[in-house]
Amino acid sequence: MKIKVHLMAIGVFLTAGLQLFGQSNLTQNRMLKFKNQTPAVQHINATMGAMAQTTDTVPVGLLENIWDTTNSVWTQDAKANLIYNSNRALEKEEVLEWNDSANEFLPLGEIVITYNTDGKVAQEITLYWDNATSAYDMNSNQNTYTYDSANNQVTEITQEWIDSTSAWVNNDKYIITYNASNFPIQEINQYWQTNAWVNSNKDTYVYDSKGKQSSETDYNWSSGSWVNGSLTTDYRDPVTDSLTSYIYQYWNGSAYVNSSKDLYSYSSSTGQLQGLIYQYWDATTTSWINSQNTNYQYDNTYKNKIGTVITQNWSAYHNGWVNSDELIYTYQALSLSGISPKNTAALQLNTYPNPATNNIVFDYTLTGNSTTVLSIYSTDGKLLRQINNGMEETGNHTLTISLKDGNGSLSSGMYFYKLQAGNNVANGKLIVQ
């Protein structure tokens, strides 16, 4: 459906992710489910979901342009407006489509997101614009999520609205299992048939010693058993540990054979992703053939944020890359003044003394092995201090930081802190005297 194509291409698919950007392992794996999208769409999907929760600025708009080959100019196609709640969580995504006759953007659809008491996405509903009522009130699709005690997503159910019966009908179900480090190791996809869930395919994941995904194996359900489907292998730089490529292979009945490959390039000065080339395997010439190229440019104001993403297709006729799509982000610094202290069942945090003068202590309890990061912000949302503790084991932990040292002395006033442990977040106010 057109609205879903736009919503995905505009980059608002919350549950997608990519491991090189430090998202959860589940969202890393979901990335591979969108292989048929352009690398630009894959990357946009990878970065949008968690950005508001992990940075001092958030994307509030995204413009999608397409290349006019006749006039050699970019032309407007669609745009998205992103709206956040007081906890900096994305709650609404509105998509508008350019209309040449009206010479303006017209409403197309929106996704409305609701959260559970732990701040995790509980449901996403996609709605069409209804010209008769001038409102987004035509149901289209909905996704519902459940979580375990460690706040790991364990199920996702997708449903489609049927107008003739005025009811939601099941489409797909995903069931995810995790290891002791809260990394997903298996995901089973089922489809709804004759009032029952039926197996469709299964993904299994393998990680290296640093907790980075190294491979994914996909199996298809056939005649009551799982049979080989495909294999994706990740390759990383031995020095920087950055993802340099991954190769997708399919099972031909006796062996895995090459199908496609992604190649990543980074800035030598900043380490930021600069390019992504997608190639396919030509069995006749036994060589990799260029297909798509994606270039990433960064915002002049928020230099660690993507400003523009340009996708190009390989043209044999021109023997070079030809423009295809352009995505342009806009950002806004959000104040954290509306955030109230919050713990989750999987992450309990106490701070003392508060108000503090010289030092402050953060006591927290992890219910599973997690990578922890502590961030301190000013009231206008500027990131002032950040401490990455790396992977920490289940149990109680204590972190003491100086408020007056050379790493970013904090003057008297009010600040906000956020402790992120894997998928879990605890935050609150800090007073410095």
Image (cartoon, rainbow, N blue to C red):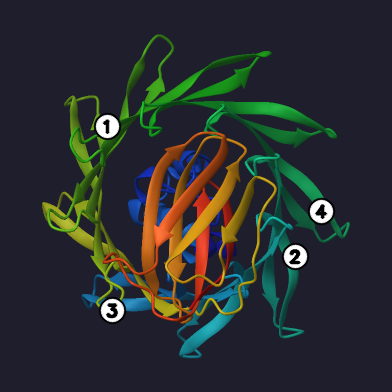
Say which element carries label 1.
Answer: strand
Given contact means CB atoms under 8 Å apart, are the residues at marks 2 and 4 in contact? yes
Q: Which residue is mark 4?
A: 168
**Quarter-of-image position of residue 269:** bottom left
The label shown at residue 301 is 3
The label shown at residue 158 is none
- N-term mark: 2 or 1: 2
Q: What is the crowding at mark 2: few (fewer than 14 residues within 10 Å), some, or many (at least 20)? A: some
Foreground: 314 or 369?
369
The label shown at residue 235 is 1
Q: What is the crowding at mark 1: few (fewer than 14 residues within 10 Å), some, or many (at least 20)? A: some
Distance between the alpha carbons at the discs numbered 1 and 4? 42 Å
- N-term mark: 2 or 4: 2
- N-term mark: 2 or 3: 2
- N-term mark: 4 or 3: 4
Say which element carries label 3.
Answer: loop
Let me know if residue 49 appears in the view. Answer: no
- N-term mark: 1 or 4: 4
Indicate the amino acid at tag 3: Thr
Say which element carries label 2.
Answer: strand
Q: Residue at left 11%, top 51%? A: 319
Distance between the alpha carbons at the discs numbered 2 and 1? 42 Å
Q: Which residue is mark 2?
A: 139
Distance between the alpha carbons at the discs numbered 1 and 3? 32 Å
Of badges 4 and 3, the one in the foreground is 3
Residue 386, percent from left and from top: 38, 60
Of badges 1 and 4, the one in the foreground is 1
Indicate the amino acid at tag 2: Asn
Distance between the alpha carbons at the discs numbered 2 and 3? 38 Å
**Quarter-of-image position of residue 75:** bottom left
